[in-house]
Amino acid sequence: MSNQNLLEKLRGGECLTLRQQALLTIQLSIPAIMAQVSSIVMQYIDASMVGRLGANDSASIGLVSSSTWLMGGLCSAAGIGFTVQVAQRIGARDDARARNIVKQGLLSVLAFSCLLMAAGTAVSGVLPVWLGGEAEICANASNYFFVYALFLPVLQLNHTAGGMIQCSGNMKLPSILHIAMCFLDVILNLLLIFPTRSVTVWGMTFTMAGAGLGVLGAALGTAFSELIIVCFMLYYLLFVSPALRLRKGEKLRFRAEELKRAVKIALPVGFEQVVMCGAQIMSTKIVAPLGTIAIAANSFSVTAESLCYMPGYGIGTAATTLIGQSIGAGRKDLTKRLGWLTTGLGMLVMTGSGILLFVFAPFMIGLLSPEPAIRELGTAVLRIEAFAEPMYAASIVASGVFRGAGDTFVPSCMNLFSMWCVRIPLAALLAPRFGLHGVWIAMCIELCVRGVLFLLRLAGKKWQRGMTDTEK
Protein backbone atom coordinates (compact mmCIF):
# COMPACT_ATOMS: atom_id res chain seq x y z
CA MET A 1 0.00 0.00 0.00
CA SER A 2 1.37 3.44 -0.93
CA ASN A 3 2.16 6.10 1.65
CA GLN A 4 -0.59 8.35 0.22
CA ASN A 5 -3.18 5.62 0.79
CA LEU A 6 -1.95 5.06 4.34
CA LEU A 7 -1.96 8.80 5.03
CA GLU A 8 -5.51 8.99 3.70
CA LYS A 9 -6.53 6.23 6.12
CA LEU A 10 -4.83 8.15 8.93
CA ARG A 11 -6.66 11.39 8.03
CA GLY A 12 -9.94 9.53 7.68
CA GLY A 13 -9.79 8.10 11.21
CA GLU A 14 -9.38 4.49 10.06
CA CYS A 15 -7.49 1.97 12.15
CA LEU A 16 -3.84 1.45 11.24
CA THR A 17 -2.18 -1.78 12.31
CA LEU A 18 1.31 -1.68 13.81
CA ARG A 19 2.63 -3.11 10.54
CA GLN A 20 0.93 -0.34 8.55
CA GLN A 21 2.29 2.32 10.93
CA ALA A 22 5.81 0.91 10.52
CA LEU A 23 5.37 0.69 6.73
CA LEU A 24 4.16 4.31 6.55
CA THR A 25 7.09 5.47 8.68
CA ILE A 26 9.59 3.66 6.45
CA GLN A 27 7.94 4.83 3.20
CA LEU A 28 8.09 8.45 4.32
CA SER A 29 11.56 8.13 5.86
CA ILE A 30 13.49 6.66 2.93
CA PRO A 31 12.97 9.57 0.49
CA ALA A 32 13.49 12.06 3.35
CA ILE A 33 16.75 10.33 4.25
CA MET A 34 17.88 10.53 0.62
CA ALA A 35 17.09 14.26 0.55
CA GLN A 36 19.06 14.86 3.75
CA VAL A 37 22.00 12.72 2.66
CA SER A 38 22.16 14.51 -0.69
CA SER A 39 22.54 17.88 1.04
CA ILE A 40 25.53 16.56 2.97
CA VAL A 41 26.94 14.91 -0.14
CA MET A 42 27.10 18.41 -1.63
CA GLN A 43 29.23 19.53 1.31
CA TYR A 44 31.28 16.35 0.91
CA ILE A 45 31.79 17.15 -2.77
CA ASP A 46 32.94 20.69 -1.99
CA ALA A 47 35.25 19.56 0.79
CA SER A 48 36.71 16.70 -1.27
CA MET A 49 37.39 18.85 -4.33
CA VAL A 50 38.80 21.75 -2.34
CA GLY A 51 40.84 19.26 -0.31
CA ARG A 52 42.84 18.54 -3.47
CA LEU A 53 43.99 22.17 -3.48
CA GLY A 54 45.75 21.93 -0.10
CA ALA A 55 45.29 22.21 3.67
CA ASN A 56 44.94 26.00 3.70
CA ASP A 57 42.07 25.95 1.21
CA SER A 58 40.36 23.21 3.21
CA ALA A 59 40.83 25.12 6.45
CA SER A 60 39.34 28.29 4.93
CA ILE A 61 36.01 26.50 4.39
CA GLY A 62 36.25 24.78 7.77
CA LEU A 63 36.77 28.09 9.53
CA VAL A 64 33.39 29.52 8.44
CA SER A 65 31.44 26.25 8.30
CA SER A 66 29.84 26.78 11.70
CA SER A 67 28.73 30.25 10.59
CA THR A 68 27.16 28.87 7.41
CA TRP A 69 25.33 26.31 9.55
CA LEU A 70 23.99 29.15 11.66
CA MET A 71 22.62 31.01 8.63
CA GLY A 72 21.22 27.83 7.09
CA GLY A 73 19.72 26.80 10.43
CA LEU A 74 17.93 30.13 10.80
CA CYS A 75 16.49 29.73 7.30
CA SER A 76 15.30 26.24 8.18
CA ALA A 77 13.75 27.49 11.44
CA ALA A 78 11.87 30.27 9.66
CA GLY A 79 10.17 27.74 7.41
CA ILE A 80 9.30 25.27 10.19
CA GLY A 81 6.55 27.50 11.58
CA PHE A 82 4.67 27.26 8.29
CA THR A 83 5.47 23.70 7.21
CA VAL A 84 4.14 22.25 10.48
CA GLN A 85 0.88 24.14 10.00
CA VAL A 86 0.63 22.87 6.41
CA ALA A 87 0.92 19.28 7.69
CA GLN A 88 -1.71 19.87 10.36
CA ARG A 89 -4.18 21.56 7.98
CA ILE A 90 -3.81 18.74 5.44
CA GLY A 91 -4.35 16.25 8.26
CA ALA A 92 -7.57 18.12 9.07
CA ARG A 93 -8.55 17.97 5.36
CA ASP A 94 -8.57 21.75 5.18
CA ASP A 95 -6.53 22.06 1.98
CA ALA A 96 -7.72 25.58 1.19
CA ARG A 97 -6.32 26.89 4.43
CA ALA A 98 -3.12 24.90 3.85
CA ARG A 99 -2.69 26.66 0.49
CA ASN A 100 -3.11 30.06 2.12
CA ILE A 101 -0.43 29.12 4.66
CA VAL A 102 1.85 28.17 1.77
CA LYS A 103 1.48 31.63 0.21
CA GLN A 104 1.90 33.44 3.53
CA GLY A 105 4.87 31.30 4.37
CA LEU A 106 6.80 31.76 1.14
CA LEU A 107 6.48 35.55 1.23
CA SER A 108 7.33 35.77 4.93
CA VAL A 109 10.44 33.59 4.77
CA LEU A 110 11.66 35.33 1.63
CA ALA A 111 11.58 38.68 3.44
CA PHE A 112 13.37 37.12 6.43
CA SER A 113 16.11 35.60 4.28
CA CYS A 114 16.76 38.92 2.56
CA LEU A 115 17.50 40.44 5.98
CA LEU A 116 19.86 37.55 6.72
CA MET A 117 21.54 38.05 3.35
CA ALA A 118 22.19 41.71 4.12
CA ALA A 119 23.66 40.89 7.53
CA GLY A 120 25.79 38.01 6.22
CA THR A 121 27.32 39.88 3.30
CA ALA A 122 28.03 42.86 5.59
CA VAL A 123 30.12 40.80 8.06
CA SER A 124 31.75 38.44 5.54
CA GLY A 125 34.94 40.50 5.34
CA VAL A 126 35.69 40.45 9.06
CA LEU A 127 34.12 37.13 10.13
CA PRO A 128 37.24 34.96 9.58
CA VAL A 129 39.26 37.37 11.71
CA TRP A 130 36.66 37.22 14.49
CA LEU A 131 36.90 33.43 14.39
CA GLY A 132 40.65 33.52 14.91
CA GLY A 133 41.69 32.33 11.46
CA GLU A 134 45.30 32.64 10.33
CA ALA A 135 46.09 35.34 7.77
CA GLU A 136 46.71 32.92 4.90
CA ILE A 137 43.18 31.44 5.03
CA CYS A 138 41.08 34.53 5.86
CA ALA A 139 40.66 35.86 2.30
CA ASN A 140 39.31 32.59 0.90
CA ALA A 141 37.12 32.07 3.97
CA SER A 142 35.65 35.54 3.51
CA ASN A 143 34.90 34.97 -0.19
CA TYR A 144 33.25 31.62 0.52
CA PHE A 145 30.99 33.07 3.21
CA PHE A 146 30.09 36.10 1.07
CA VAL A 147 28.75 33.92 -1.75
CA TYR A 148 26.92 31.69 0.72
CA ALA A 149 25.23 34.72 2.31
CA LEU A 150 24.37 36.25 -1.06
CA PHE A 151 22.35 33.17 -2.04
CA LEU A 152 20.53 32.77 1.29
CA PRO A 153 17.11 33.66 -0.24
CA VAL A 154 17.57 30.76 -2.66
CA LEU A 155 18.50 28.41 0.20
CA GLN A 156 15.50 29.67 2.19
CA LEU A 157 12.99 29.01 -0.58
CA ASN A 158 14.56 25.62 -1.20
CA HIS A 159 14.17 24.64 2.47
CA THR A 160 10.63 25.95 2.82
CA ALA A 161 9.19 24.77 -0.49
CA GLY A 162 10.73 21.33 -0.03
CA GLY A 163 9.41 21.14 3.54
CA MET A 164 5.89 22.05 2.44
CA ILE A 165 5.92 19.40 -0.28
CA GLN A 166 7.16 16.84 2.24
CA CYS A 167 4.52 17.79 4.81
CA SER A 168 1.84 17.21 2.17
CA GLY A 169 3.03 13.58 2.12
CA ASN A 170 5.18 13.75 -1.03
CA MET A 171 8.67 12.80 0.10
CA LYS A 172 9.89 11.52 -3.26
CA LEU A 173 10.06 14.71 -5.31
CA PRO A 174 12.25 16.74 -2.91
CA SER A 175 14.51 13.70 -2.63
CA ILE A 176 14.86 13.37 -6.42
CA LEU A 177 15.53 17.09 -6.82
CA HIS A 178 18.16 17.12 -4.07
CA ILE A 179 19.93 14.17 -5.67
CA ALA A 180 19.88 16.03 -8.99
CA MET A 181 21.36 19.01 -7.17
CA CYS A 182 24.33 16.85 -6.14
CA PHE A 183 25.06 15.96 -9.76
CA LEU A 184 24.80 19.62 -10.75
CA ASP A 185 27.18 20.51 -7.94
CA VAL A 186 29.79 18.05 -9.19
CA ILE A 187 29.60 19.38 -12.74
CA LEU A 188 29.73 23.04 -11.75
CA ASN A 189 32.53 22.45 -9.24
CA LEU A 190 34.63 20.73 -11.89
CA LEU A 191 34.19 23.75 -14.12
CA LEU A 192 34.63 26.45 -11.46
CA ILE A 193 37.15 25.16 -8.88
CA PHE A 194 39.96 23.87 -11.09
CA PRO A 195 41.82 25.57 -13.95
CA THR A 196 41.79 24.30 -17.54
CA ARG A 197 43.70 21.02 -17.47
CA SER A 198 44.40 17.72 -19.20
CA VAL A 199 42.33 14.81 -17.89
CA THR A 200 42.93 11.12 -18.63
CA VAL A 201 39.94 8.76 -18.45
CA TRP A 202 40.20 5.09 -19.52
CA GLY A 203 43.42 5.81 -21.38
CA MET A 204 42.00 8.77 -23.29
CA THR A 205 43.37 12.27 -22.62
CA PHE A 206 41.33 15.39 -23.24
CA THR A 207 41.33 19.03 -22.15
CA MET A 208 38.72 20.08 -19.58
CA ALA A 209 37.90 23.76 -19.35
CA GLY A 210 37.97 25.35 -15.93
CA ALA A 211 37.72 28.77 -14.31
CA GLY A 212 40.35 28.04 -11.63
CA LEU A 213 38.45 29.91 -8.88
CA GLY A 214 39.37 27.49 -6.07
CA VAL A 215 37.39 28.00 -2.86
CA LEU A 216 35.26 30.70 -4.49
CA GLY A 217 34.38 28.25 -7.27
CA ALA A 218 33.16 25.72 -4.70
CA ALA A 219 30.81 28.31 -3.22
CA LEU A 220 29.50 29.37 -6.63
CA GLY A 221 29.00 25.79 -7.78
CA THR A 222 26.81 25.02 -4.78
CA ALA A 223 24.91 28.31 -5.07
CA PHE A 224 24.07 27.90 -8.76
CA SER A 225 23.01 24.27 -8.18
CA GLU A 226 20.56 25.40 -5.51
CA LEU A 227 19.24 28.17 -7.78
CA ILE A 228 18.43 25.73 -10.57
CA ILE A 229 16.75 23.22 -8.28
CA VAL A 230 14.63 25.74 -6.37
CA CYS A 231 12.97 26.75 -9.66
CA PHE A 232 11.71 23.17 -10.10
CA MET A 233 10.74 22.92 -6.41
CA LEU A 234 8.63 26.09 -6.54
CA TYR A 235 7.05 25.11 -9.86
CA TYR A 236 5.84 21.81 -8.42
CA LEU A 237 4.60 23.37 -5.18
CA LEU A 238 2.69 26.21 -6.80
CA PHE A 239 1.46 24.65 -10.06
CA VAL A 240 1.48 20.83 -9.78
CA SER A 241 0.98 19.65 -6.16
CA PRO A 242 -2.51 18.10 -5.87
CA ALA A 243 -3.20 19.64 -2.46
CA LEU A 244 -1.14 22.83 -2.46
CA ARG A 245 -1.04 24.22 -6.00
CA LEU A 246 -2.54 27.68 -6.62
CA ARG A 247 -6.26 27.87 -7.42
CA LYS A 248 -8.13 30.57 -9.26
CA GLY A 249 -10.20 32.76 -6.99
CA GLU A 250 -8.19 31.93 -3.85
CA LYS A 251 -6.69 35.22 -2.80
CA LEU A 252 -3.83 35.55 -0.35
CA ARG A 253 -5.06 36.40 3.13
CA PHE A 254 -2.60 37.20 5.86
CA ARG A 255 -4.19 35.62 8.91
CA ALA A 256 -2.87 36.98 12.18
CA GLU A 257 -3.46 33.70 14.06
CA GLU A 258 -1.43 31.69 11.53
CA LEU A 259 1.41 34.19 11.49
CA LYS A 260 1.46 34.24 15.30
CA ARG A 261 1.50 30.45 15.44
CA ALA A 262 4.30 30.34 12.87
CA VAL A 263 6.33 32.72 15.02
CA LYS A 264 5.49 30.73 18.16
CA ILE A 265 6.81 27.55 16.55
CA ALA A 266 9.74 29.10 14.69
CA LEU A 267 11.17 31.35 17.40
CA PRO A 268 12.28 28.53 19.72
CA VAL A 269 13.68 26.63 16.73
CA GLY A 270 15.55 29.75 15.60
CA PHE A 271 16.79 30.25 19.15
CA GLU A 272 17.89 26.62 19.13
CA GLN A 273 19.83 27.17 15.91
CA VAL A 274 21.54 30.24 17.37
CA VAL A 275 22.40 28.27 20.50
CA MET A 276 23.66 25.23 18.59
CA CYS A 277 25.58 27.11 15.95
CA GLY A 278 26.87 29.63 18.47
CA ALA A 279 28.28 26.67 20.33
CA GLN A 280 29.76 25.37 17.07
CA ILE A 281 31.39 28.75 16.51
CA MET A 282 32.76 28.63 20.04
CA SER A 283 34.05 25.12 19.29
CA THR A 284 35.77 26.55 16.20
CA LYS A 285 37.46 29.14 18.40
CA ILE A 286 38.59 26.34 20.72
CA VAL A 287 39.95 24.36 17.76
CA ALA A 288 41.54 27.32 15.91
CA PRO A 289 44.58 27.64 18.22
CA LEU A 290 45.37 23.96 17.64
CA GLY A 291 46.61 24.83 14.11
CA THR A 292 45.69 24.46 10.44
CA ILE A 293 45.87 20.65 10.48
CA ALA A 294 43.44 20.47 13.40
CA ILE A 295 41.05 22.96 11.76
CA ALA A 296 41.02 21.02 8.49
CA ALA A 297 40.72 17.63 10.24
CA ASN A 298 37.87 18.95 12.39
CA SER A 299 36.02 20.33 9.36
CA PHE A 300 36.47 17.16 7.30
CA SER A 301 35.44 14.97 10.23
CA VAL A 302 32.26 16.97 10.78
CA THR A 303 31.42 16.59 7.09
CA ALA A 304 32.19 12.86 7.12
CA GLU A 305 30.15 12.27 10.28
CA SER A 306 27.23 14.17 8.74
CA LEU A 307 26.70 11.29 6.32
CA CYS A 308 25.96 9.11 9.34
CA TYR A 309 23.46 11.34 11.13
CA MET A 310 21.58 12.60 8.07
CA PRO A 311 19.40 9.43 8.11
CA GLY A 312 18.27 10.57 11.54
CA TYR A 313 17.26 13.97 10.18
CA GLY A 314 15.42 12.27 7.34
CA ILE A 315 13.43 10.12 9.77
CA GLY A 316 12.87 13.24 11.89
CA THR A 317 11.37 14.98 8.86
CA ALA A 318 9.06 12.02 8.32
CA ALA A 319 8.14 12.15 12.01
CA THR A 320 7.15 15.82 11.72
CA THR A 321 4.85 14.97 8.81
CA LEU A 322 3.31 11.97 10.58
CA ILE A 323 2.77 13.70 13.91
CA GLY A 324 1.53 16.91 12.25
CA GLN A 325 -1.03 15.11 10.11
CA SER A 326 -2.07 12.86 13.03
CA ILE A 327 -2.74 15.90 15.19
CA GLY A 328 -4.58 17.69 12.40
CA ALA A 329 -6.76 14.61 11.98
CA GLY A 330 -7.41 14.44 15.73
CA ARG A 331 -5.70 11.04 16.01
CA LYS A 332 -4.50 11.21 19.61
CA ASP A 333 -4.43 7.41 19.59
CA LEU A 334 -1.54 7.43 17.11
CA THR A 335 0.64 10.36 18.09
CA LYS A 336 2.64 8.88 20.94
CA ARG A 337 2.92 5.47 19.29
CA LEU A 338 4.22 7.03 16.08
CA GLY A 339 6.59 9.17 18.14
CA TRP A 340 8.22 6.11 19.69
CA LEU A 341 8.12 4.16 16.42
CA THR A 342 9.98 6.84 14.48
CA THR A 343 12.46 7.48 17.28
CA GLY A 344 13.20 3.77 17.65
CA LEU A 345 13.72 3.45 13.89
CA GLY A 346 16.12 6.40 13.94
CA MET A 347 18.16 4.89 16.77
CA LEU A 348 18.33 1.54 14.98
CA VAL A 349 19.44 3.08 11.67
CA MET A 350 22.05 5.33 13.28
CA THR A 351 23.44 2.49 15.38
CA GLY A 352 24.22 0.81 12.07
CA SER A 353 25.67 4.01 10.61
CA GLY A 354 27.81 4.43 13.75
CA ILE A 355 29.31 0.97 13.21
CA LEU A 356 30.02 1.82 9.58
CA LEU A 357 31.56 5.13 10.66
CA PHE A 358 33.96 3.37 12.99
CA VAL A 359 35.00 0.80 10.38
CA PHE A 360 35.26 3.09 7.36
CA ALA A 361 36.59 6.25 9.05
CA PRO A 362 40.00 6.08 7.27
CA PHE A 363 38.30 5.71 3.87
CA MET A 364 35.85 8.57 4.51
CA ILE A 365 38.59 11.00 5.54
CA GLY A 366 40.80 9.73 2.72
CA LEU A 367 38.22 10.83 0.18
CA LEU A 368 38.31 14.35 1.56
CA SER A 369 42.04 14.97 1.93
CA PRO A 370 45.30 13.45 0.69
CA GLU A 371 47.24 14.97 3.65
CA PRO A 372 48.48 12.09 5.91
CA ALA A 373 48.35 14.19 9.10
CA ILE A 374 44.76 15.27 8.43
CA ARG A 375 43.70 11.72 7.60
CA GLU A 376 45.25 10.25 10.75
CA LEU A 377 43.73 12.86 13.08
CA GLY A 378 40.34 12.76 11.34
CA THR A 379 40.14 8.98 11.58
CA ALA A 380 40.83 9.06 15.31
CA VAL A 381 38.15 11.62 16.16
CA LEU A 382 35.52 9.99 13.93
CA ARG A 383 35.96 6.73 15.81
CA ILE A 384 35.37 8.57 19.08
CA GLU A 385 32.14 10.05 17.71
CA ALA A 386 30.82 6.71 16.42
CA PHE A 387 29.84 5.70 19.96
CA ALA A 388 27.42 8.62 20.27
CA GLU A 389 25.34 7.93 17.14
CA PRO A 390 22.44 5.96 18.74
CA MET A 391 21.73 8.63 21.38
CA TYR A 392 22.26 11.40 18.84
CA ALA A 393 19.53 9.72 16.77
CA ALA A 394 17.17 9.84 19.76
CA SER A 395 17.55 13.62 20.05
CA ILE A 396 17.24 14.24 16.30
CA VAL A 397 14.11 12.19 15.66
CA ALA A 398 12.38 13.09 18.92
CA SER A 399 12.92 16.74 18.00
CA GLY A 400 11.06 16.06 14.73
CA VAL A 401 8.23 14.47 16.73
CA PHE A 402 7.97 17.50 19.01
CA ARG A 403 7.96 19.91 16.07
CA GLY A 404 5.06 18.06 14.48
CA ALA A 405 3.15 18.66 17.71
CA GLY A 406 4.14 22.33 17.77
CA ASP A 407 6.28 21.74 20.89
CA THR A 408 9.53 23.59 20.26
CA PHE A 409 10.33 25.68 23.34
CA VAL A 410 11.39 23.02 25.87
CA PRO A 411 13.45 21.00 23.33
CA SER A 412 15.31 24.20 22.47
CA CYS A 413 16.07 24.76 26.15
CA MET A 414 17.36 21.20 26.45
CA ASN A 415 19.71 21.82 23.53
CA LEU A 416 20.87 25.04 25.20
CA PHE A 417 21.71 23.14 28.37
CA SER A 418 23.51 20.24 26.69
CA MET A 419 25.62 22.40 24.36
CA TRP A 420 26.61 25.21 26.69
CA CYS A 421 26.66 23.40 30.04
CA VAL A 422 28.18 20.11 28.86
CA ARG A 423 29.96 20.28 25.49
CA ILE A 424 31.63 23.71 25.55
CA PRO A 425 33.01 23.52 29.13
CA LEU A 426 34.27 19.98 28.54
CA ALA A 427 35.86 20.91 25.20
CA ALA A 428 37.59 23.95 26.74
CA LEU A 429 38.84 21.74 29.56
CA LEU A 430 40.05 18.84 27.40
CA ALA A 431 41.41 20.61 24.29
CA PRO A 432 44.61 22.00 25.90
CA ARG A 433 45.49 18.56 27.22
CA PHE A 434 44.28 16.21 24.46
CA GLY A 435 44.04 18.49 21.41
CA LEU A 436 41.32 17.77 18.88
CA HIS A 437 40.72 14.38 20.49
CA GLY A 438 39.54 16.19 23.63
CA VAL A 439 37.10 18.34 21.67
CA TRP A 440 35.48 15.27 20.13
CA ILE A 441 35.38 13.37 23.44
CA ALA A 442 33.42 16.30 24.82
CA MET A 443 31.10 16.15 21.80
CA CYS A 444 30.49 12.42 22.26
CA ILE A 445 29.60 12.83 25.95
CA GLU A 446 27.29 15.77 25.25
CA LEU A 447 25.37 13.96 22.50
CA CYS A 448 24.70 11.04 24.85
CA VAL A 449 23.42 13.43 27.53
CA ARG A 450 21.20 15.16 24.96
CA GLY A 451 19.73 11.84 23.80
CA VAL A 452 18.77 10.91 27.35
CA LEU A 453 17.05 14.28 27.87
CA PHE A 454 14.99 13.92 24.69
CA LEU A 455 13.95 10.35 25.50
CA LEU A 456 12.76 11.47 28.92
CA ARG A 457 10.74 14.26 27.28
CA LEU A 458 9.23 11.80 24.79
CA ALA A 459 8.22 9.45 27.61
CA GLY A 460 6.20 12.22 29.25
CA LYS A 461 2.93 13.81 28.15
CA LYS A 462 3.78 17.50 28.20
CA TRP A 463 4.95 17.62 24.57
CA GLN A 464 1.45 16.61 23.45
CA ARG A 465 -0.04 19.81 24.85
CA GLY A 466 0.86 21.50 21.57
CA MET A 467 -2.07 19.62 20.03
CA THR A 468 -4.66 21.74 21.73
CA ASP A 469 -3.83 24.82 19.62
CA THR A 470 -4.58 23.00 16.40
CA GLU A 471 -7.82 21.49 17.61
CA LYS A 472 -9.49 24.84 18.26
Image: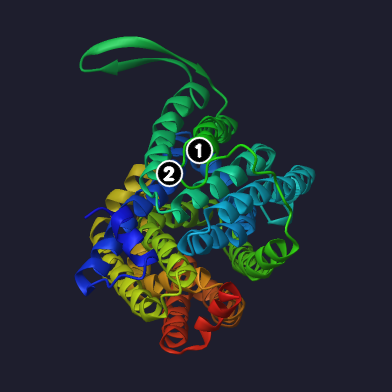
Q: How far is the residue under mark 1 from the one under mark 2?
A: 7 Å
Q: Nearer the viewer, residue 437 or 226?
A: 226
462 lies above or below 171:
below
Name the quarter where the C terminus is drawn.
bottom right
Q: Farthest residue toward the front? A: 249
Q: Nearer the viewer, residue 147 or 134?
A: 147
Q: Amino acid at mark 1?
A: Met
Q: Amino acid at mark 2?
A: Pro
User: Could you say where residue 326 lies in the image, as x and y percent from the top left?
Assistant: 42, 70
Residue at 22% across, 73% down: 17
Circle 2 — which element? helix
Q: Dots 1 and 2: beta carbons under 8 Å?
A: yes
420 lies above or below 242:
below
Dividing the picture into quadrants, the one containing residue 354 is bottom left
Q: Disc 1 marks which residue? A: 233
Residue at 24% across, 60% down: 356
User: Could you say where residue 29 lies in the image, as x and y percent from the top left?
Assistant: 33, 58
